[in-house]
Image (tube, rainbow, N blue to C red):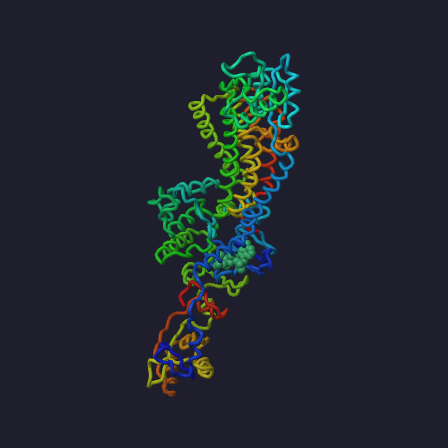
Amino acid sequence: MEKSSRNPSANRASSETELLVTSVTEPVKSWPIGVLVRTRLIEFSRRPAAVFWTYVFPLVMMFILGSAFRSQGESPSQVGILLGSQAEVLKQKLQSSPDLVVAVVDLEDGLRRLRAGRLAVLIRESARTNRGTETFPFELIYDPQRIGARTAELLVQRQLRISEGVPESYQFHRVPYSEPGGRYIDFLVPGLIGMVLLGGGLWGVGYAIVDMRIRKLLKRFLATPMRKSDFLLGIVFSRMMFVIPQIAVIMLASYLGFSVTNHGSWFEFALLVLLGGLQFAGVGLLIASRAKTMETMSGLINLAMLPMWTLSGIFFSYENFPELIQWPIRLLPLTPLLDTLRGVMLDGNSLTQHPIELALILSWTVGTFGLALWLFRWTDGQ
Amino acid sequence: MKFAIDCRNLVKTYAAKPPVQAVRGIDLQVEYGECFGVLGPNGAGKTTTIEILEGLLSATSGDVQVLGCTWERDSAEIRQRIGVSLQETVLSDDLTVAETVRLFRSFYRRALPVEQALSRVSLQEKAHARVNKLSGGQKQRLAVACAIVSEPELLFLDEPTTGLDPTSRREVWEIIRQLRANGRTILLTTHYMDEAQRLCDRVAIFDEGRVIALDTPDQLIRSLGGDQVVRFSFARRQDPQQHLSPDATFLDRLRGMPTVSHVESVSDRVQLTCQQFPVVVTVLIEFLHQHDYVLSDLSTREATLDDVFIHLTGKRLEGSAA
Ligand SMILES: Nc1ncnc2c1ncn2[C@@H]1O[C@H](COP(=O)(O)OP(=O)(O)OP(=O)(O)O)[C@@H](O)[C@H]1O
Ligand SMILES: [Mg+2]
């Protein structure tokens, strides 16, 4: 019969010390911070989604954008010349600069393009002079707050000095164009509305769904007779409920602060906002249809948002981009929405004047909803 | 329509590297009005099985009928008639208790009023409290309220009391007993032998994806060949504080004692299962006396499902008292 001990210290000398060997402790040599850091790194490296979105995605974006813009250098400034006796001559002179793209336009078209950011400056013949300085016989009409206006002015000035051989001191007579509807802020507000609709759809719908999937709430719902279409429509409708006050606040603030208003029909404006909201709810739903972790979700949302943020014309017109990438830009869901919003708000267009844009918006909406319903997973398992 | 749940040769293999055979051929027949317990250690396949029965996972193979219907044909019908509480759903923190129940209630054709569902689980006072302000036990009762709001004929509860303190566990037990008394059929999973023993009419013990025993708790215990567990330590008469470990010959002698059916030892503690412990103890003391030993510790208790599990698998269930 073997002896065993309840009280090892009293029995150190006994022959059954093997029994105790297994429970002997040893000094811990590792360094807690080191172990913590290592653990974090291991966790991170085992989440392929996190690694991808943190390391690979920025590189991918860099290469895509970098190669899109590589050969173009700085994009040329868009300049308009008002119809007149000297317009063609002036166009010839300016066109010899590679940095300027010149078009002869009538007043209505010129101002519209100026408002839409498609022209940086508009040049008009003029006999007026600035007292005390020598001036060109031209006026420059532009919005001083718009990005690129000043650059365009300097480029036109330099080109004229070269071709006319006039001294440095020659100036333009400047006509700041800042009546409501034509200022940068008027251009910006529709852009911001589009941006809010985009972010709201992707985060508001997409994030909420992935969160419920992670919490197994979707699985729990699946165990009830709840109709799946009810659930998805509920999410989308509640999103639309948020949209209305959100946009109302932006419109009110920009009216009070900058007298920005809608020059088109309010009904059509509201319809367009709802269509836009629905479209991005669809994109959000599609992105969320399979994502199982927040890292994946955030990454996918960024992937979808970044091209639209940078290219679709929230802050400046995409017509400044090289022609080659303009047509893919026009296909992104945000671009037709912004173009139509600006058409309605700035130019007072009716929706019927934007059939292609509306068709694109509707296709995105139907396409994303359809695909999302087909791909959607309620559980994270099998 | 004979069984509330009829599940034959159920197999589930998760696609993974390597594939996980979570369920390896399970047969279960749960009768109407019965409280049926699925008992087993971590990873035994309890959740996998119950989620297949709930229509949330697809089986690799096997036949499942729930309330006489199959998931392929009548999923909408089954969902109206069952109630489910999952092992790990996190209900929305920012809703109140009443709002949560109202949400789940809205999915059914017929359901209890919110107040009644809450009073079934004694949560009326908390109706307007936010979910994130509830204790663990209260959250669990809320999950049960959401599961019973439609007055389901068949209720699935996956580990309804895991992680709860003894008082909360008793409260959940009381709710389950009430439901059982109202004629509901209940399938619950648990790690706790005592829970299964107290609540369940019949119990299936799962291990590694198989049913290793299935019977009423009493029958399972009786199948041990005894229902008393005797535990003791012994020592030399001269040194009664110094407990000794038994050797193989000693254990064999114990196995030979009248009505003893099972003997095991963990270092210096010996445990045996028997039918007539007074006889066994008398013989034991006599035997020890002959060899100049004395009993230094002795306890007896009723056998439990724990002992059944240890007997069947040689393993101990986690979460239950050793
Ligand atoms: N989605 C999955 N993919 C791969 N393997 C899985 C998956 N879900 C579960 N398993 C494995 O299947 C086995 C059974 O798991 P299951 O969740 O059914 O066990 P359980 O009895 O409910 O355990 P517990 O008591 O811990 O809840 C385990 O080995 C588990 O690792
Ligand atoms: Mg489980």
Residue A36, image x and y in percent? 45, 58
Please identify the quarter of the rendering in which residue B17 is found. bottom right
Identity of the residue drawn at 40% across and 66% down: B321
| B36 w.r.t. A110: above or below | below
> Is residue B63 rendered to the left or right of residue B256?
right
Q: Can the viewer see residue B44?
A: yes
| B210 w.r.t. A208: above or below | below
Q: Nearer the viewer, residue A345 or A88?
A: A88
Residue A339, image x and y in percent? 57, 26
Residue A167, image x and y in percent? 57, 21
Q: Nearer the viewer, residue A117 or A91?
A: A91
| A231 w.r.t. A351: above or below | below
Give the mark count: 0
Q: Can the viewer see residue B29?
A: no
> Is residue A353 rendered to the left or right of residue B297?
right
Residue A262, image x and y in percent? 50, 21
Say which quadrant the C terminus of chain B sits in.
bottom left
| A279 w.r.t. B189: above or below | above
Q: Nearer the viewer, residue B314 or A252?
A: A252
